Image: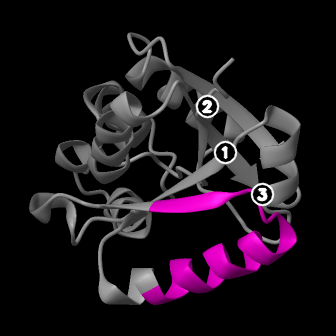
Amino acid sequence: MKEEKIALFPGSFDPITKGHESVIRRAVPLFDKLIVAIGINIDKKYFFTVEQRKQWLIEVFKNESKIEVMVYEGLTVDFCKQVNANFLLRGLRTSADFEFERSVGQVNKMMLPSIETLFLLTTPEHTALNSSMVRDIIRNGGDASEFVPQAVGKDLIAFKKSDNTK
């Protein structure tokens, strides 16, 4: 029996951007299962709750039967073992992303030799986009809906109207 190709795409998704969505959708055909996992870092302050971020991911990928959304704490390689993921998927926007992700990927490989890290380049229109920029737009009362999936954009408009940014 052929081993199932399971990939893990970890991130904070605070919030998910169109860049994340593009990388994930383009990766789906490569794997039997793709776990989009929200990693919880206790030292990091998040803008949106983990419940909200998980709900957005579920909504964005509701029609993708190969995608499962999960939340985890601790080392990503330990979570890979837990869910039997043999691939780590990462999106690259810039050469700086590559240098950082290469280092992380090499350490992960030393900790879990069976794991392979795969990089997908972002599409050109998403190269400058990241969650920090989106949060900054929201925090300062701007409209970030063009940078996030439609399901998220609708919620951000409601979020802005409720004035949770102050």
**Amino acid type assigned to the residue bearing label 3 in the image:** Thr
From the image, tell me which residue sits under label 3. 76
Most foreground residue, 117 or 36:
117
In the image, residue 93 sits, relative to residue 1, either above or below, namely below
List x then y, in percent, for residue 35: 61, 34
**Magenta range:** 99-118
Q: Which callout, 2 or 1, points at the residue further toward the start of the chain?
A: 1
* Rendering quarter of residue 104: bottom right
Q: Are marks 2 and 1 in contact (CB under 8 Å)?
A: yes
* Rendering quarter of residue 38: top right
Q: Which callout, 1 or 3, points at the residue further toward the start of the chain?
A: 1
Q: Which callout, 3 or 2, points at the residue further toward the start of the chain?
A: 2
Q: Secondary structure at mark 1?
A: strand
List x then y, in percent, for residue 82: 88, 38
Residue drawn at the location 22% of the way across and 72% of the way down = 128
Q: Secondary structure at mark 3?
A: helix
Q: Are marks 3 and 2 in contact (CB under 8 Å)?
A: no
**Amino acid type assigned to the residue bearing label 2 in the image:** Lys
- Left/right of residue 56 with respect to residue 17 in the rendered view: right
Most foreground residue, 48 or 122:
122
In the image, residue 59 sits, relative to residue 97, either above or below, namely above
From the image, tell me which residue sits under label 2. 54
Can residue 133 be seen at all in this image of the molecule? yes
From the image, tell me which residue sits under label 1. 38
**Nearer the observer, disc 1 or disc 3?**
3
Q: Which quadrant: the N terminus?
A: top right
